[in-house]
Amino acid sequence: MSTQTSFVTPEAPLKAYASTAGAAISSLSRREARERPRALASPKDFRTEPGPVRFVIVALAVSFLTIFVVLPLVVVFASALSKGFGAYFAALAEPEALSAIRLTLLVAAISVGLNLLFGVIAAWAIAKFDFPGKTFLVTLIDLPFSVSPVISGLVFVLLFGAQGYWGTWLQAHNVHILFAVPGIALATIFVTFPFVARSLIPLMQEQGTQEEEAAISLGASGLQTFFRVTLPNIKWGLLYGVLLCNARAMGEFGAVSVVSGHIRGETNTMPLLVEILYNEYQFVASFAIASLLAMLALITLVVKTVLEQRLDEGQTPRDDPRDDLRDDPSDH
Amino acid sequence: MTIEVKNIVKRFGAFAALDNVDLKVGKGELLALLGPSGSGKTTLLRIIAGLDWPDAGEVRIDGEDALGHGASERHVGFVFQHYALFRHMTVFENVAFGLRVQPRAVRKDEATIRARVKELLDLVQLDWLANRYPSQLSGGQRQRIALARALAIEPRILLLDEPFGALDAKVRKELRQWLRSLHSEIHVTSIFVTHDQEEALEVANRVVVMDKGRIEQIGTPGDVYDNPATAFVHGFIGESIVLPVEVSGGSVRLGGRPLNIAADGAASGASKLFVRRHDMQIGPAGTGSLEGAVRHVRSFGPIQRAEIALTGGEGKTVIEIDAPRDRELQAGEIISLQPRRYRIFAAQE
């Protein structure tokens, strides 16, 4: 994946060398060790910093991570469990909590489903075809990332609110968008729109259109080409986009807060409920819901790592230099 | 099956990729489209396949209007320069693809498909790779699988776009001969695009030389080599010596000095004299039309290649000639040169 994973800091290769060099020589078979560049095996490795410098840098990184990532996570779970497991599960079993969980799952399902569809179509169009206005479309897809979520929510209030453009018409026809599930879903879809398309476009562009052209020349229809050739080639990238999209959809606060109306037991999603409970000094309940979101984040991270590995494997260079060394009796 | 291309025009913006191209390909031919990059040869091939559409003109496959059909309905086998194998399918499934996507009404049953794929893999001599993935194959193997895949649909015609372009020289040579013998075995009308003249001359029955979106010459390999129709063809195929000459009233002058050759009906004016490297007759000084000093000689195999600085004329003109080794040339020697066979074309620029 080019967008999320390919940033390589100057020191990253050094670290990689430093960490592998020691372990590699002991654990690899002799043959593999022989094939490694000789410089790595030499006793003094000029490619890495002296010991004390390394220690300071690593210590800095670890303390940063501890303060900004690990501690908050620990606090969330510690606070949630501060009155024991009984209170924790009781808080989650509250009707308000259950309703928030249901609503969050529903909204996530709607927005992920639709964004999956829109995202694949947009990425397919952008990566595989040339048409006027393509650059504009790409910019448009990025728009939700560059706009504050609160503004995104406000836009829907302006459109569908009682004083909004279509407000009167909607009221006359008894259609409820704002302060109801449709509004929350719309705001979430808007905010999470770029994830699927963004994770697919570079992948599909890199793969080019040759396989599709081959499929068509072999007699495949457009749909057959998509389902038999394009989709299998992008499946890991697609899952990756869906995963990020889902995480954001469940966690979205700003845009949803504006359009939700905070009707208890009806239009509160999990992030909104966390805030409400916290403001009402119900710390255990608040952190209990928050702990669910934190767990979602952790699961997302694990799955994301696995998917990134699959993506890298899927993109092993096709012109592997070892190809020429492979045995092929009929080539000779 | 025959292919007929009439008045094809294709523009990309202001650039004319194809400028009124006409071409007829007979049944069972193996035709090469030869030209430098940007000459429009790949565009022409893609238009015949239905992967590109012309701005004007007609394409008929077996007499039937092909432009009325998309690529998936044309029954044309297409082999890509970079193979374009389906990376997530095994070799077997790659070859079977064209059979599996057929409409249900005509689709064959699984056993027939398996037998057919086996037969094709045997044909390209790679049946032992059936369960591998494309990334596990060498370039030459991938291209043969791509060919088997294209043949699976029993195409009316076979189109190959720089089929050996991505391979190294040795594999390329082997595959060339292999393609020739395969063609004489299955006899499907085929067109292949190449920028490699050796490949075109060695493999094809007929060669179409293209430049700047136009066809310069169509002929057998011997024809285009021995009787080039235009200055471009002469310069592009084979190695030529090109000298700027002046034609006036039947005599040919180089830098003011008359050359002892006939103008062969060339029009008066600034012209270019084309001579093949091996068509320069060498003699002792004073016996030929041109004279020069040998600067450098390299000998290999049956020939010696000499770099010669021509004397007289404007400035220093250095040419390279190929001479038989019956008389070894020495650096510094002054020799005379006489074109044995030559062509004169009007200078265009």
Image (spheres, grey):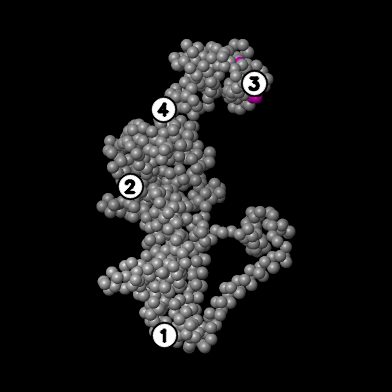
Is disc 3 placed on a helix, strand or loop? strand
Residue ID for mark 2? B72
Could you confirm whether marks 1 and 3 are on the same chain?
A: no
Q: Are marks 3 and 2 on the same chain?
A: yes
The residue lying at 65 percent from left, 57 percent from top is: A33
> In the rendered structure, which amino acid carries the disc numbered 1?
Glu
| Pick the front one: A43 or B68 | B68
Residue at 42 percent of width and 82 percent of height = A97
* Dot 2: chain letter: B
Q: Amino acid at mark 2?
A: Ser
Residue count near mark 1 (Cα–Cα under 10 Å), binned few <14, some 14–19, many ≥20 = few
Q: Chain of mark 4?
A: B
In the image, is residue B205 above or below residue A64?
above
Question: Marks 3 and 2, Cα distance to the nearest angstrom?
Answer: 60 Å
What residue does disc 1 label?
Answer: A94
Q: Which residue is mark 3?
A: B294
Same subunit, tags 2 and 4: yes
Mark 4 element type: strand
| Alpha carbons under labels 4 and 3: distance apart | 35 Å
Alpha carbons under labels 2 and 4: distance apart: 31 Å
- In which quarter of the view is residue B50 placed? top left
Magenta-colored segment: predominant secondary structure:
strand
> Bounds of the magenta span?
B291-297
